[in-house]
Amino acid sequence: MMDVMTLVDEMSLKIILGVEPLDSFDSYVSKMKASKIDRAIEIQKLALNRYEKR
């Protein structure tokens, strides 16, 4: 999850500052999927569900 957070922070700043064009958003999303963001989200949801059941 730390890799994903780093990527989000870096890309957000680059897009806001205009270093990266908005057209590069698709490559940004594919980088996130390559870092297995779907699995990280699944793990977070499972942990939240366990917490809510207490």
Image (spheres, helix red, strand yellow):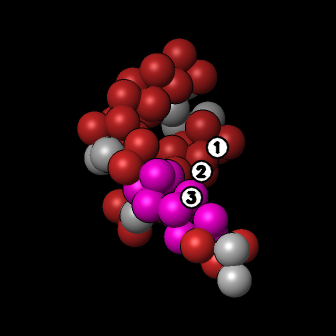
Type of the residue with mark 2? Leu
Q: Which residue is mark 3?
A: 45
Of helix, strand and loop, which one carries label 1?
Answer: helix
Task: Please name the residue shown 28% across and 38% down the image.
Answer: 34
Of 15 and 49, the residue lying toward us: 49
Of mark 3 and mark 2, the one earlier in the sequence is: 2
Task: Tell us which disc is closer to us: 3 or 1.
Answer: 3
- Residue 50's disc is none
Is 41 left, or right, of 34 in this rendering? right
In this rendering, the answer to whether 50 lies above or below 15 is below
Q: Residue at x 41, y 56 (%)?
A: 40
Q: Where residue 45 sits: x, y (%)?
A: 56, 58
| Residue depicted at 46% across the width and 52% down the height | 42
Q: Going 62% across and 68% down the picture, which residue do you hit? A: 48
The x and y percentages for residue 50 are 58, 73
Question: Does the stretch in magenta take in 46?
Answer: yes
- For discs 1 and 2, the disc positioned in front in the rendered view: 2
Residue type at the position of mark 1 = Leu
- In this rendering, the answer to whether 36 lies above or below 20 is below
Pick the residue in front: 43 or 16. Answer: 43
Crowding at mark 2 (Cα within 10 Å: few <14, some 14-19, many 20+): few
Residue on which disc 1 sits: 17
Q: Which quadrant would the N terminus be assigned to in this image?
A: bottom left
Depth check: 6 or 41 in front? 41
Q: Does 9 sit left or right of 1 as displayed? A: right
Q: Nearer the viewer, mark 3 or mark 2?
A: 3
What secondary structure is marked by label 3? helix
Mark 1–mark 2 CB contact (< 8 Å): yes
Residue extending farthest to the left is 34
x and y, in percent, of residue 35 in the image: 30, 46
Could one spot residue 25 in this view of the protein?
yes
Magenta-tinted stretch = 40-49
